[in-house]
Amino acid sequence: MVDLAYVIAGSEATGGAGLQADLKTFQELGVYGVGTVTCIVSFDPANAWAHRFVPVDPQVIADQIEAATAAHPLDVVKIGMLGTPATIDVVAQALGRQQWRHVVLDPVLICKGQEPGAALDTDTALREKVLPLATVVTPNLFEASVLAGLDSIASEADLIEAARRIHALGPQYVVVKGGVELPGDEAIDVLYDGEQATVFKAAKVGDERVSGAGCTLAAAITAELAKGAGIEDAVEFAKEFVTAGIEGRLAANTPFDSVWQGAYVEQLALDEG
Ligand code: PXL
């Protein structure tokens, strides 16, 4: 029988990030995806692709979670963009109603193009209510510096220190993503389990950010965990999957290209001739 993976996240209307990227990733990796929408993000093409954000009514989020969890035996969930303290409350309550094998939290504080100040009340609520429920948390550089209370993260050693500090907030595993903004030629990610830091490196693909990279990495970790992989294998594979997706990225009229989740399978088919 097919394995199932669940995602609670925001819709991103261009298809590049959010729930759309998550469900595409699940499908590519052979898991049956179930999704709950927390908010709707529609970038504004008439206003330099500025961020337009509409939260879904908390009761409607609760109804979706009720339907999804009643329909399927879900035990691995990815949490993406929540967006407001009210949404965080309703999702944290719903998560607390059952046991989960894994809760993968992508602690989305702001989207590309949004003002950092918008993140402060969401940061506090996320840290207090959702982080303690997470088994895996996948912050990018900005999220890691906020959660770890570090002014700057500029090296592999800083990534490890950030991971240590975030681990102390409750999650079992921390994956800090260096991305294109960490200085150097390599995209470096660190997995920390409370004792050991494992470092994953790949050559940077260009020096521009790509929409959906963080969502896709966390979704691929979620899919692999759903299929029974261990955390280290899940992170290693997810990095390969997202690197292929960045190499095969889709250009758009938006300021950032988008990850193409089909690229990994396309590359495999080519390699096999
Ligand atoms: O990439 C972070 C992200 C996650 N979720 C949604 C988004 C974005 C960024 O645009 O819109 C819904």
Image (spheres, rainbow, N blue to C red):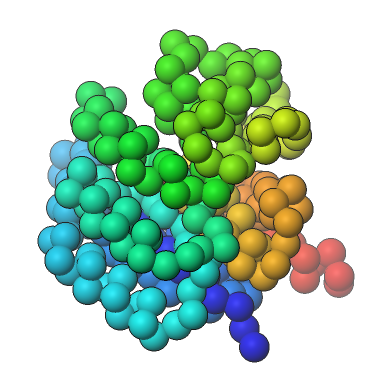
Is residue 17 in sight in this rendering? no
x, y percent for residue 48: 22, 37
Above or below, 125 relative to 161: below
Q: Is residue 24 above or below residue 257?
A: below
- Say if residue 75 shows up in the picture: yes
Q: Residue furthest right?
A: 272
Query: In the figure, residue 188 lies in which quadrant?
Result: top right
Q: Nearer the viewer, residue 95 or 67?
A: 95
Q: Is residue 128 above or below residue 272?
A: above
Q: Nearer the viewer, residue 164 or 18?
A: 164
Q: Residue at x 48, y 27 (%)?
A: 144
Q: How many marks?
A: 0
Residue at 31% of width from left, 33% of height from top? 123
Where is residue 153 drawn, in percent x and y? 54, 16
Residue 148 at x, y percent in the picture: 47, 22
Identify the residue at horizontal 23%, vertical 57% (top origin). 90
